[in-house]
Image: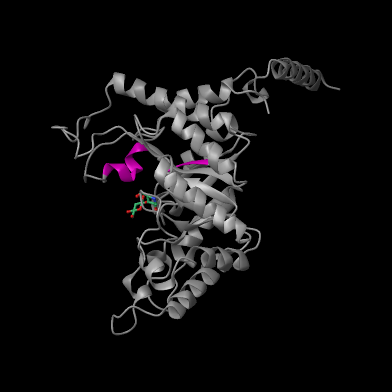
Amino acid sequence: MSSRSRNWLHAMGAVLLAAVAIGCARVRPVAVGRAPRTLRTAFEGAFLVGAALNVAQFSGRDTAGAALVRAQFNAITPENVLKWQSVHPRPGVYDFATADQYVAFGERDGMFIVGHTLVWHQQTPRWVFQDSSGNPVSRDTLLARLRDHIETVVGRYRGRIRGWDVVNEALNDDGTLRPTPWLTIIGVDYLAQAFRFAHAADPAAELYYNDYALENAPKRNGALDLVRRLRAAGIPITGVGLQGHNRMDWPTAAQQDSTIVAFAGLGVRVMITELDIDVLPRPNQSATVLNPYPNGLPDSVQHALAQRYAELFTVYERHAADIGRVTFWGVADGDSWLNHWPVRGRTNYPLLFDRQHRPKPAFEAVMGVAAQAPAR
Ligand code: 9MR
């Protein structure tokens, strides 16, 4: 044996011993010596860490963004390209050109590829609900369209897209079903039907109900009820997506915690699917300045954002056994939808990477949570 390989073996032995020692101290072994510098490694064994991608990132236009995605994440969600209007813009016309690029991007690195979303009231063309004279179609016609759409889209990526947001945002804030054309034309069973069609098209795919603000009690109760009823009827729902469009003061850690516990208690996996933290004032607040940080985030806010991320990830870590994935809604601050909603053209700072793709203090805070976590 050369002295070089002996030295190598010696070094590996030391690392293993350190890992055992640290493992005994109940600190995750991946934190040995050099702390891991990527989110996907830091949370290995806990949950997948994902990001929603835009076309520039997976088509090769934004090479820096793509490199950051490959380095940091092991799951991806398409921000827009698998929505009905993108993939099925006209009757009988499917366009998979960009969606195919998205899936190929994830396959290159063996990422967990998510599909978003099959049934929603937004980004669905009006023709879906209308006949050729513009009148509402019958229940049977709409069910047939829904079945065709789901069979075609899920079927195309069978075995490749591993989890689908089957129904998105079906609930009102008070927990009742939103009066969308899906509900008014098909009736309350439209959700069950969508899950059945998706399961038939890819029996191995995970199937989720995805919504925002489920941390608020009335909406959460509505969602719990919905999941309970679907499960009781044998509908193949495997998980619930808590979108996680958070604010600095909402939801509280306690609300986040009890929401995860409540869904996990029904026997479904919990996913955080669209994570971001809005640091800007809402226009309906008494804010006089709507875009207070156009040239950068003051240190105090940067610090508060990092603390807030640490607070949320501490909750996710605590429930890692029930959480399959934590996905950010975007990669770097410049990509976020929150620069354009609810006010266009603002400068927001909701993610872990800044506009130059550099890790922010919030990134360090999240990595710090992973380093403190017990070994699994
Ligand atoms: O980030 C998406 C944005 O680019 C689209 O214009 C918008 C259209 O409604 O949808 C955004 O993504 C939404 C997601 O699909 C569902 N949950 C809320 C997200 C933010 O609006």
Q: Is residue 367 left or right of residue 299?
A: right
Image quadrant for the N terminus?
A: top right
Q: Residue at x 58, y 66 (%)?
A: 196
Q: Nearer the viewer, residue 50 or 99?
A: 50
- Describe the colour scheme in one phrase: one colour
Image quadrant for the C terminus?
A: top right
Q: Nearer the viewer, residue 338 or 66?
A: 338
Q: Is residue 315 above or below residue 161?
A: above
Q: Residue 133: x and y, percent?
A: 28, 84
Q: In which quarter of the image is residue 199?
A: bottom right
Q: In this view, does 257 lie to the left or right of 133?
A: right
Magenta span: 326-339
Check residue 335 for magenta coloring: yes
Q: Which residue is drawn at 37% across and 58% down?
A: 178
Q: Residue 258: x and y, percent?
A: 50, 34
Q: In this view, does 192 lie to the left or right of 308?
A: right
Q: How many labels does the image show?
A: 0
Q: Nearer the viewer, residue 189 or 62?
A: 189
Q: Residue 44: x and y, percent?
A: 62, 34
Q: In this view, does 122 lie above or below 325?
A: below
Check residue 142 for magenta coloring: no
Q: Is residue 74 visible?
A: no
